Image (tube, rainbow, N blue to C red):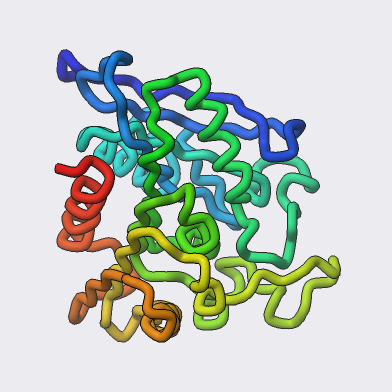
Amino acid sequence: LPSDWEWPEPVKLKGSDDTTDIYGVVFRPPGFSPEQSYPVVDFSSPLRSIGSLPAGSFTNNVFLGYDYLVAAALATLGFVVVTIAGRGTPLRNKAFYTHHYGDRAFSSDLTDRMAGLRQLAESYPYMDLERVGMSVNENPISNGIYGSLLYSDFYKVTVIHCVHDPRFWEGTMSEALELSGSPTGLPKTPHPEDCVDSFSGKLLLIQGMGNLAPIQPTFLLVDALIKANKDVDMLCIPNEHHVVCTYGQRREWDYLVTHLLGA
């Protein structure tokens, strides 16, 4: 390994209810110094349907180690990268898994993840919570876009590859009970295009235009942002499908470096 290699650190935190244990992994950049200040990236990967929080080194994880390796690559750019599995993700008890069941904005509860980041910043003051971004891959995570739209005072910069929406995707892949009404009687989070009024951050939407890439969620959202006179950046990639391609990955890194690192 390189001489300046930093092993990621598993952490145990409390959810936004101050009671529930939640877990995460912290990736620090090579050559890390606690005397410096680092912007933070929430690598938003945990899913409602699959436990994707890194559990081992390198490829010793689901998706051939994708979540571990991409988080480590982001850290190499100069960020402290944190991935947290909030309530609403699997491999825990039923109450944890069915937290806010039927409301897709609470899949891997965003308030849990923000609470976890605040706790980490208290222990690690080199984490600059005035410079927090979010990276969201093409997995049907459902709620990544809500971090940008509803909490742009916290998540200042967000990059999303292929916005997901269960209205235009297989219901088995994501939280879709809202389509027919939740049996829990919980209030429904509006669709992303209905959540643009409070948005004030930086947002890059990367969308493949191939025939296997549902484009409706991205275009509905961009149309709503335009009508609300909100700034948004968009990259459409011809002949690309529902994936994170190498060009899109490079453009994501450039965007985060530009707007979080100011470099």
Q: Position of residue 23 (x, y in %)?
A: 58, 32
Residue occupying image coordinates x 46% and y 59%: 148
Residue at 56% x, 67% y is 173
Is residue 126 something one can see in this rendering? yes
The mark tally for this picture is: 0
Seen at 74% across and 61% down, the residue is: 101
Instruction: Using the rendered image of the protein, determine whether residue 59 is visible from the camera's viewpoint.
Output: no
Q: Position of residue 6 (x, y in %)?
A: 29, 20
**Front one among 18 and 50:** 18
Counting from the top left corner in percent of width and height, residue 69 is at 30, 39
Residue drawn at (30%, 43%), measured in percent from left and top? 70
* Nearer to us in this view, 191 or 166: 191
Please identify the quarter of the rendering in which residue 4 is found.
Answer: top left
Q: Which quadrant holds the N terminus?
A: top left
Question: In this rendering, would 117 be left or right of 49?
Answer: left
Q: Nearer the viewer, residue 58 or 111?
A: 111
Q: Is residue 240 above or below residue 112?
A: below
User: Looking at the image, is 104 positioned above or below residue 109?
Assistant: below
